[in-house]
Amino acid sequence: MRLLYSLPAAAVATPAMAASGPFFSLSNTDFIVSIAFLVFVGVLIYFKVPGMLAGLLDKRSETIRTELDNARRLREEAQTILAEFERKQKDVQEEAGRIVAQAKRDAEEAADQARKDLDASIARRIRTAEDQIASAEENAVREVRDRAVQIAVAAAGDVIAKGMTPADANALIEDSLATVDAKLH
């Protein structure tokens, strides 16, 4: 396009710009250069170079337009994917929050259950200890009674032995044998 605008400028060249002498002379270098230029432009037009250049420029602009469209499309896809990933990230964060909250609730429930189990275990051990203490107490009372009976029997035996005559002892033995014989038969 610039080429077409420069043609009139070349045609309007004035003799003031030329070397000395008449402009339309073959000895004038400006005239020769102007003619060569016009021939060159004519050859370019004859071989349709401006059309080819315009076609190449159109093709290049179409390629650039296609690349821009592809870039826009890729950008839109990237924005869509980014939005999807952000949504998924938000969902994952919410899910993680729910999991953490559930884990806290489960831990609290497990701690409560552990406290209850510990309390029950302590209560069982206390009952067992109380039962053992009561049993030991009963055994101690029984042993004290048995020992008291043994001491009382021994003391009574000593008292009876000291105050009893051999005749009383024989009568007591015969009486005891009669009692045993009556109870066995």
Image: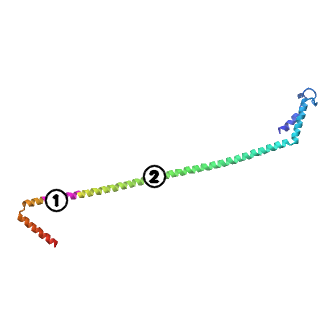
Q: In the rendered view, would you say 31 is above or below 52?
A: above
> Visible in this render: residue 89?
yes
x then y, percent, for residue 61:
77, 44
Label 1 belongs to which residue?
150
Q: In which quarter of the image is residue 37?
A: top right
Q: Does the magenta stretch include residue 29?
A: no
Tag 1: amino acid: Gln
Q: In this view, does 166 lie above or below 119?
A: below
What's drawn in magenta, residue-wise?
140-154
Q: Which residue is drawn at 60% across and 50% down?
A: 87
Q: Which of marks 1 and 2 is nearer the N terminus?
A: 2
Q: In this view, does 132 lie to the left or right of 50?
A: left
Q: Is mark 1 on a helix, strand or loop?
A: helix
Residue 117, position as x, y percentages in the image: 39, 55
Kind of residue sitting beneath label 2 = Ala
Q: Which residue is drawn at 82% across and 43% down?
A: 54
Looking at the picture, the colour scheme in use is rainbow
- Circle 1 packing at 10 Å, graded few (<14), some (14-19), many (20+), is few
Residue 107's label in the rendered image is 2
Would you say 182 lies left or right of 29 here?
A: left
The x and y percentages for residue 173 are 10, 66
Q: Nearer the viewer, residue 175 or 105?
A: 175
Which SS class for mark 2?
A: helix
In the displayed image of the protein, which residue is found farthest to the top? 20
**In the displayed image of the protein, which residue is found farthest to the bottom?**
185
When asked about the image quadrant of residue 168, the answer is bottom left
